[in-house]
Amino acid sequence: MKKRHGKILSVLRFDSKGLIPAIVQDYKNKQVLMVAYMNRRALVKTLDTGKAHYWSRSRKKLWMKGETSGHIQKVKEIAIDCDSDSILLKVDQRVAACHEGYRSCFFRKLKGGKLVVSARKVKG
């Protein structure tokens, strides 16, 4: 860990599994793109590279958003909430944030008690 990261890491309150939720937002239009989890390594890698890295809870490994699809997230700004237990990443999203091909993972809306797809898949 680089010394310059010590301040942010000492402020954050990771959960008992060493994770913290990361809300990801488009820095231009403010659209919420996704929610993921970061551990200390993911945050340090993000700070070092400027590209968003996360911890996969299912695969139990570090991953960079877009490492296989090319749909990377360039981090423009990082904010910490008032309790220091979640992170907001404002990013320049390349193409889709959702692994299903939508710009945002929040592509379904609840209407009349049913989930309805409210967006189109993006091409990239």
Image (tube, rainbow, N blue to C red):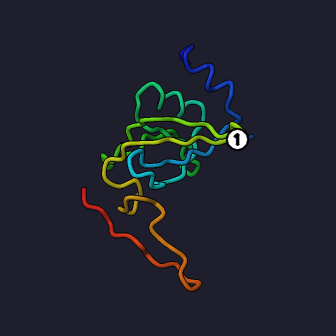
Badge count: 1
Pick the front one: 2 or 32 = 32
Residue 71 location (% of width, % of height): 33, 48
In the image as oriented, which residue stretches furthest toward the right? 16
Residue extending farthest to the left is 124
- Which residue sits furthest top? 3
Where residue 10 appears, x then y in whole percent? 68, 24
Residue closer to the observer: 81 or 105: 81
Residue ranking furthest to the bottom: 112
Closer-to-camera residue (25/41): 25
User: Picture quarter containing residue 82?
Assistant: top right
In the image, is 98 to the left or to the right of 12? left
What element does badge 1 sit on?
Answer: loop
In the figure, is residue 42 to the left or right of 85? left
**Image quarter of the C terminus:** bottom left
72 in relation to 41, above or below: below
Residue 62 coordinates in the image, percent (x, y) = 50, 38
- Mark 1: few, some, or many residues within 10 Å (few <14, many ≥20)? few
Residue named by callout 1:
17
Measured as percent of width and height from the top left, residue 85 is found at 69, 40
The amino acid sitting under disc 1 is Lys
Q: Is residue 3 above or below residue 31?
A: above
68 to the left or right of 78: left
Closer to us: 94 or 79: 79
Taking the spot 68% from the left edge, 27% from the top edge, the residue there is: 11
- Pick the quarter of the image with the N terminus: top right
Q: Residue at x 44, y 38 (%)?
A: 52
